[in-house]
Amino acid sequence: MPKKVLPLTDIQVKNAKPQEKPFTLFDGGGLFLVVLPMGGKSWRFKYAFQGKEKRLVFGLWPEVPLAQARKLRDDARALVAQGVDPGEKRKQDKAETDAQALAAVNTFEKVAREWHSRHYAGKDPVNVAKILARMEQYLFPAFGDVAVDALRPPVIRDVLHQVEDQGHNETAHRLRQYCEAALEYARACDLTERNVAADLRHALTPCHTKNRPAIIDPKGVGELLRAIDGYMGSPVTLAALKLSAMLFVRPGELRQMEWAEIDLAALDGPRWSIPAEKMKMRAPHVVPLPRQAVAILEDVRLLTGAGKYVFPSARGPARPMSNMTINAALRRLGYEQGEHCAHGFRAMASTLLNESGQWPRDVIELQLAHQERNKVRAAYNRAEHLPERRKMMQWWSDRLDALKAGPAVIPLHRTGAAVA
């Protein structure tokens, strides 16, 4: 008859002294304590599962006291009785816990911020900050703490629909694009197997882009140019207004113009070379400078030539002109927000150049720096059409002068327009 095992007591466990070799104290039901030569006391559990003898380690005493060790033993025996291997279950539980911990680290907000910092490195800081602000306002509060591999389309869709319901359709489309780009980054980093935001491409009301307000009839253009000539504010702002009409680049490109980018002594004629990182399409762009633009730049150099920017901020030369300056100047001249804006000079030039019938559409589009889908053709065209674009830019400046001359009876400023 086997010898009966008496349960251990807390005193026995505490007073067990280490020996030269490990020895065992049995508690019963498969639970035993191994006293190690170095002084450690380890709780172990022996059990049989599917005909095989197996063991589990429950931890060290006193971190795991006797009562807790018995509870762990009883739980393990209950699993065996249910046909579950407690050792395998422990492995599965640990794997799930580790996965949850990893998922908690790879939340949507963390991954989106990492994508944002990498993708927009070195790009226009104003636009970069605007994109992050949109995500911070709409996306992060809603599901920023959700793991990227646990995110599902309905969660994103509901947020986008809420933004749409507030009347911000274009913002909703942009937010969906940010989600798709961030999750594509997560997929590339092997953090998720599926880009769920891609499933939402047709979940929003189609975005109908509104054209920016612009004056495009010749008489109105002449009136605008005469008003600009009479601007009584900063001479630097006045120069920016004139070049906006003359060069019809994007407002962000104009206000970030640097003196180092201007070459008035280039062999093929004066030019402004805009680097790729400043362009919307991320391709370098050359703006041929007509003689009227050269004269304006030579005058402005006397005011800002010692600094980096042609049009520095009023707050200091280390920063470019504010993105609101041109629009504010137009408001001061009496042009309301729905009539004309800084970006409207591009539509003005595009319309009148195309209506003139003197310039191929490709040449106009190239000067507007609209994207050419065929990259090889784009590179070829940039070189092929530069002489023709130079002629067109001079023609355009001469055309503006003619429109500005106009009938002498038209007043310099609109009635009631502020000129201070």
Image (cartoon, grey):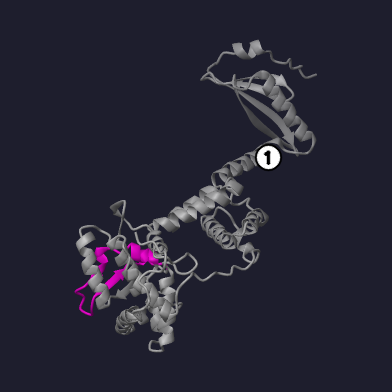
Label 1 secondary element: helix
Quadrant for the C terminus in the image: bottom left
Q: Which amino acid does label 1 sit on?
A: Glu
Looking at the image, residue 314 lies above or below residue 224 = above
Looking at the image, residue 344 lies above or below residue 393 = above
User: What's the residue at 68%, 34% (across, down)?
Assistant: 54
Q: Is residue 71 magenta?
A: no
Looking at the image, residue 56 lies above or below residue 153 = above
Q: Quadrant of residue 195?
A: bottom right
Residue 375 can be seen, yes or no: no
Q: Is residue 271 magenta?
A: yes
Closest to the observer, 53 or 91: 91
Q: Where is residue 238 in the image (x, y as percent from the top left)?
A: 31, 65
Q: Quadrant of residue 278?
A: bottom left
Q: In which quarter of the image is residue 332?
A: bottom left
User: What's the residue at 60%, 52% (across, down)?
Assistant: 149
Q: Position of residue 231 (x, y in %)?
A: 33, 65
Q: Where is residue 267 in the image (x, y as percent from the top left)?
A: 20, 78
Closest to the observer, 105 or 74: 105
Q: Where is residue 314 in the image (x, y as percent from the top left)?
A: 31, 54
User: What's the residue at 69%, 29% (across, down)?
Assistant: 46
Looking at the image, residue 36 lies above or below residue 164 = above
Left or right, 397 with reference to 220: left
Residue placed under numbered mark 1 in the picture: 88
Range shown magenta? 251-280
